[in-house]
Image: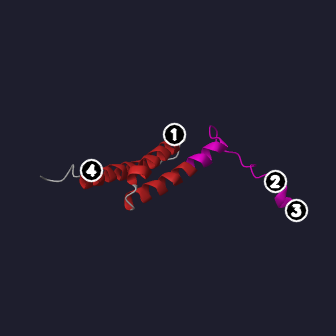
């Protein structure tokens, strides 16, 4: 039973690095995962006018907490602008005269 007597955190980290620096925040990862779902569904199922801003919002939360979600924020913007263009085209605003 000698293997179980040593604690899991017995290894020392390099100076200046805390245990929290090694693992991202769980809420940040969850926000990034929500941004992934919102941006992909918003772009490909033409629900970007609703899901695009949600993807942008969640990606900014993840980025503020230290998880890189910039690409999903950009995809959220693409879904939002694309949906707005499609809606304006269907309303007749962007159709040639």
Helix, strand or loop at mark 3: loop
Q: Which residue is mark 3?
A: 1
Q: Which residue is mark 2?
A: 6
Q: Which residue is mark 4?
A: 88
Q: Which residues are magenta?
A: 1-29
Q: In this view of the protein, which residue sits in the foreground, 10 or 26? A: 26
User: N-terminal of the two: label 2 or label 3?
Assistant: 3
Q: Is 75 part of what is drawn in magenta?
A: no
Q: Quadrant of the N terminus?
A: bottom right
Q: Are marks 2 and 3 in contact (CB under 8 Å)?
A: no
Q: Position of residue 8 (x, y in %)?
A: 76, 52
Outermost residue to the right: 1
Which residue was labeled with disc 1? 64
Residue 85, how many percent across, how many down?
28, 51
Residue at left 51%, top 39%? 64
Instruction: Answer few, some or many: residues within 10 Å of disc 3's Cα (few below 14, many 20 plus, some between 14 and 19).
Output: few
The answer for how far apart the CA atoms under marks 4 and 3 are is: 70 Å
Is any part of residue 23 visible from this angle?
no
Q: Classify 10 Å Cα crowding around label 2: few (below 14), some (14-19), many (20 and above).
A: few
At horizontal 50% and vertical 46% (from top left) the residue drawn is 58
Q: Label 2 vs label 4: CA separation?
A: 65 Å
Q: Which circle, 1 or 4, is nearer the viewer?
A: 4
């Amino acid at each position: 039973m000698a293997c179980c007597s040593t604690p899991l955190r017995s290894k020392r980290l390099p100076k200046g690095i805390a245990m929290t620096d090694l693992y991202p925040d769980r809420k940040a990862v969850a926000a990034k995962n929500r941004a992934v779902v919102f941006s992909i569904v918003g772009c490909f199922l033409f629900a970007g006018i609703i899901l695009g801003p949600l993807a942008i919002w969640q990606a900014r939360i993840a980025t503020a907490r230290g998880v890189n979600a910039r690409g999903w924020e950009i995809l959220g913007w693409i879904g939002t602008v694309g949906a707005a263009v499609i809606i304006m085209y269907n309303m007749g605003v962007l159709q040639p005269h």
